[in-house]
Image (cartoon, coloured by chain):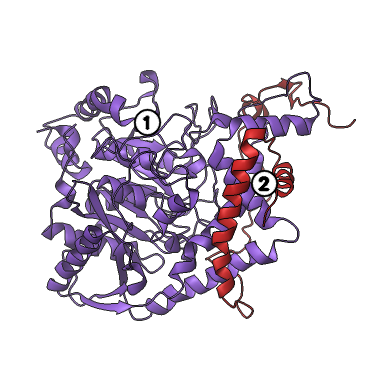
Chain colours: A purple, B red
């Protein structure tokens, strides 16, 4: 038995029976990192051995990878960007504080697309992460380092952030479970902001039970995040119920369109059939504004990003670049040179697109228009959820694509998030669960969406599905 | 649709100094993306309210009391250049 292939709940049982210690578990993960990290490149940086904390007396001594956009006290946190190289935060993000309190062992910062701008983890300043199932393929993104760490057994758990699908899309590509909770469910204090009306932190695990356990640790109100909601957090393990009898599940026709990979479509339809056999009622529904989601998202997300990233100016922290003597060097020259040197191409593209959308003369046609279409997209969901408990779709239109395949075509890259973006625009919770493999052995993910604050519904459906199927038990043998 | 001058203007508003070899590429990229976004023109939103936030957020207040925080020394120690407890930057006023 390979310890690092186990789920956290299996590990915790072994520790309770005193068959293994937390240290044994960490060693197995550490050994795997030494063996496979060179090929996978899931991490931006690893925790210094001296800072590693393994406490056998804590409840959840589980090795976890943290996306490189969450602040860890005194541990380099860079958003995988040159502009933050060397940045060591003076505080822990709230999720990090909660994880440390529960005993989780922070293995390192996972690689990501620079500032979470991407769907493939190729825009990282550290170079791309490779998909553990096929090293020539991308792991998805932007939390591709986090999902690859779990899929390659280089971590038992991981934390990601999801602005337009950045947890769910790479979870689908890597064959793991990735949850984007309801907007406001998890504190974002200490998460380096991308698009503040969309960003949400969530768990990446091997199965649904682990997802519920990890949500129990990270969810909840935080006075330090004014957008976090003061609402009781249920014990999510209570929703691990093997029963979908009578649940009403909507299947939106706009998500089964031409252009979606035939094997992905079939795998999701098979999963739907499995739930039907267990007594769920399935019916076709319509989310008519789906086709406008990507365009709406790229206006809103880049506008918010251009504003959030204005703070990277070389003054307070991070990179500072002053132009060579030949040019004048006022403070503005310092800003422009710092940002020119520190940001990668995709970051520049998005900051500029957002700046354009917000600029005088274009605001009404772009940003304001985007906010109005967002209303229409949200109303589509409100309407369906009046009669349905959940919605099921493919997480992505295809399985993982090849490294380099989409880097020169931003729009084709953006379209790989076509099925995940709407959940962020409407704030609802959504999860990706492994539901099959393609003929070339790449994982396929199914997405389940529910009403705001009904993560329990996602866990219930996902748990039932995982009692019948064993896609979530497949492990990469690297 | 979008000219090289537009791109340089946006770059200036964004406080990013573009290198010559970046300008053409970014012009083309932004043009393609803006072209894609024009699909929103198919929608009539004249009677639709904008959604800037999905939750009905209200301003959050707290008592105006002193609570422990980072402290000045801790907050500025990660800056590239500090002098007398302040961030030091190039000349602001000509």
A367 sits left or right of A159 in the view: right
Which of these two is toward me, A406 or A244? A406
The residue positioned 76% from the left and 31% from the top of the image is A333
| Residue A144 falls in image quadrant | top left
Whether residue A372 is visible: yes
The residue positioned 30% from the left and 40% from the top of the image is A137
- Under circle 1, the secondary element is strand
The residue positioned 68% from the left and 38% from the top of the image is B16
Which of these two is toward me, A256 or A237? A256
What crowding class fits label 2: few (fewer than 14 Cα within 10 Å), some (14-19), or many (20 or more)? few
Instruction: Kindly identify which residue carries mark 2.
Output: B65
| Disc ID at residue A43 | 1
Disc 1 is attached to a residue of which chain?
A
- Under circle 2, the secondary element is loop
- In percent of width and height, residue A176 lies at 26, 47
| Disc ID at residue B93 | none
Whether residue A305 is visible: no
Circle nearer the viewer, 2 or 1: 1
């Amino acid at each position: 038995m390979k310890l690092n292939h186990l789920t956290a709940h299996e590990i915790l049982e072994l520790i309770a029976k005193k068959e293994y210690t937390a240290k044994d578990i960490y060693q197995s993960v550490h050994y795997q990192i030494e063996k496979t990290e060179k090929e996978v490149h899931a991490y931006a940086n690893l925790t210094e051995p001296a800072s590693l904390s393994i406490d056998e007396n804590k409840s959840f001594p589980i090795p976890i990878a943290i996306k490189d956009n969450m602040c860890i006290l005194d541990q380099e946190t860079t958003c995988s960007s040159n502009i933050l190289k060397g940045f060591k935060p003076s505080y822990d993000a709230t999720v990090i504080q909660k994880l440390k309190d529960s005993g989780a062992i922070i293995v390192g910062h996972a690689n990501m697309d620079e500032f979470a701008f991407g769907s493939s983890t190729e825009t990282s300043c550290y170079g791309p992460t490779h998909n553990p199932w096929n090293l020539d393929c991308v792991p998805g993104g932007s939390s591709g380092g986090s999902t690859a760490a779990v899929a390659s057994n280089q971590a038992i758990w991981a934390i990601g952030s999801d602005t337009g699908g950045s947890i769910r899309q790479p979870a689908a590509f890597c064959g793991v479970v990735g949850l984007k909770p309801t907007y406001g469910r998890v504190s974002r204090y200490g998460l380096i902001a991308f698009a503040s009306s969309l960003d949400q932190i969530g768990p990446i695990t091997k199965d649904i039970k682990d997802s519920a356990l990890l949500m129990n640790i990270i969810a909840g109100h935080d006075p330090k995040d004014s957008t976090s909601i003061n609402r009781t957090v249920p014990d999510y393990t209570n929703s691990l119920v093997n029963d979908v009898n009578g649940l009403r599940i909507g299947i939106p026709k706009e998500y089964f369109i031409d252009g979606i990979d035939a094997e992905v479509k079939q795998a999701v339809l098979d999963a739907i059939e499995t739930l039907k056999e267990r007594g769920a009622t399935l019916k076709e529904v319509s989310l008519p504004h789906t086709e406008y989601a990507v365009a709406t998202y790229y206006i809103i997300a880049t506008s918010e990003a251009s504003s959030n990233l204005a703070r990277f100016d070389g003054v307070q922290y991070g990179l500072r670049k002053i132009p060579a003597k030949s040019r004048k060097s006022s403070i503005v020259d310092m800003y422009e040179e710092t940002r020119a040197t520190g940001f990668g191409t995709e970051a520049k593209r998005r900051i500029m697109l957002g700046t354009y959308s917000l600029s005088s003369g274009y605001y009404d046609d772009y940003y304001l228009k985007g906010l109005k279409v967002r209303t229409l997209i949200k109303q589509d969901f409100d309407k369906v959820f009046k009669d349905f408990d959940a919605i099921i779709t493919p997480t992505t239109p295809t399985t993982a694509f090849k490294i380099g395949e989409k880097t020169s075509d931003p729009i084709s890259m953006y379209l790989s998030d076509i099925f995940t973006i709407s959940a962020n625009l409407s704030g609802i919770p959504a999860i990706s669960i492994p539901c099959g493999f393609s003929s070339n052995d790449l994982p396929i993910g199914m997405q389940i969406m529910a009403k705001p604050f009904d993560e329990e519904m996602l866990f219930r459906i996902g748990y039932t599905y995982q009692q019948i199927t064993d896609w979530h038990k497949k492990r990469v043998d690297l | 649709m979008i000219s090289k001058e537009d791109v340089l203007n946006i770059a200036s508003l964004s406080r990013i100094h573009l290198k010559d070899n970046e300008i053409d590429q970014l012009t083309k990229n932004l043009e393609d993306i803006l072209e894609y976004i024009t699909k929103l023109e198919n929608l009539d939103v004249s009677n639709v309210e904008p959604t800037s936030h999905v939750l009905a957020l209200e301003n959050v207040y707290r008592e105006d009391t002193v609570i422990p925080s980072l402290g000045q020394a801790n907050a500025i120690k990660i800056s590239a250049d500090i002098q007398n407890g302040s961030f030091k930057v190039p000349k602001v006023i000509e």
